[in-house]
Image (cartoon, rainbow, N blue to C red):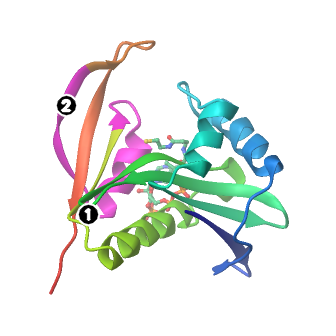
Amino acid sequence: MNKFLELDNGKIVESKNSYHKDDILKIEKIERTYFVDSWNIKQINSQFKNDDSLNFIIENTGDIISYCLCKFNDEFIEILKIATIRNYQKKGIASNLISNVYSFAVKNSLKKIYLEVRESNLIAIDLYKKKGFVVDGIRKKYYVRSNENAILMSKNINYP
Ligand SMILES: CC(C)(COP(=O)(O)OP(=O)(O)OC[C@H]1O[C@@H](n2cnc3c(N)ncnc32)[C@H](O)[C@@H]1OP(=O)(O)O)[C@@H](O)C(=O)NCCC(=O)NCCS
């Protein structure tokens, strides 16, 4: 499921609901800029096509400025990728995307959102903590290329 959103006067609103090949290329470029373990076009393409994926993409005047790529099953949803390009960072965009993931989880009666993050990525860890994620554990030397530990984090979905 691919949900395109648009930044409109600082607000995030629904936009188109289908994607073009260009969107894959734009995300691939952002991946190369912001991730050591960036996804290639094939990976992004299959993420966009999978039935068990949830993808939020935020655009501003035709450019992709942020995205959050997830996969889910009957019980859990995992955030696989989340990024905001530099000029739009610290404006609450990634926080908003995480709230959207949470709403999806509630609507689909899921139990938990989980993710993993590099131990050195203090900005992302800070963001997740602010959004109510807790640390579940550490996977030692999970990131082979950089020999870095992964921090496993999750957030339970609360139902009244
Ligand atoms: C991590 C990332 C997705 C945050 O995106 P964002 O849209 O800027 O996030 P938000 O504006 O919603 O920030 C929410 C919180 O994150 C933290 N944060 C975000 N940018 C920060 C910065 N430059 N310095 C310190 N903390 C920062 C803060 O806790 C912030 O809360 P605050 O605004 O109350 O201080 C973005 O920095 C990014 O794309 N980084 C590169 C890719 C990456 O590391 N992705 C995560 C992989 S697990």
Residue under the point 26% across and 63% down: 132
Measured along the vertical axis of the image, is residue 104 above or below residue 94? below
Q: Quadrant of residue 120?
A: top left
Locate residue 121, reporting x and y percent. 41, 36
Magenta region: which residues?
117-140
Q: Which residue position holds label 1?
A: 132
**Residue 81 part of the magenta segment:** no
| Amino acid at the residue labelled 1 | Gly
- The crowding category of the residue bearing disc 1, from other C-alpha atoms within 10 Å (few below 14, some 14 to 19, many at least 20), is few
Number of numbered discs overlaid on the protein picture? 2
Quadrant location of the N terminus in the rendered image = bottom right
Quadrant location of the C terminus in the rendered image = bottom left
Residue under the point 30% across and 76% down: 106
The first of marks 2 and 1 along the sequence is: 1
Residue under the point 84% across and 67% down: 61
Separation (CA) of disc 2 from disc 1: 18 Å
Residue under the point 24% across and 39% down: 152
Locate residue 18, reporting x and y percent. 72, 65
Q: Which residue position holds label 2?
A: 138
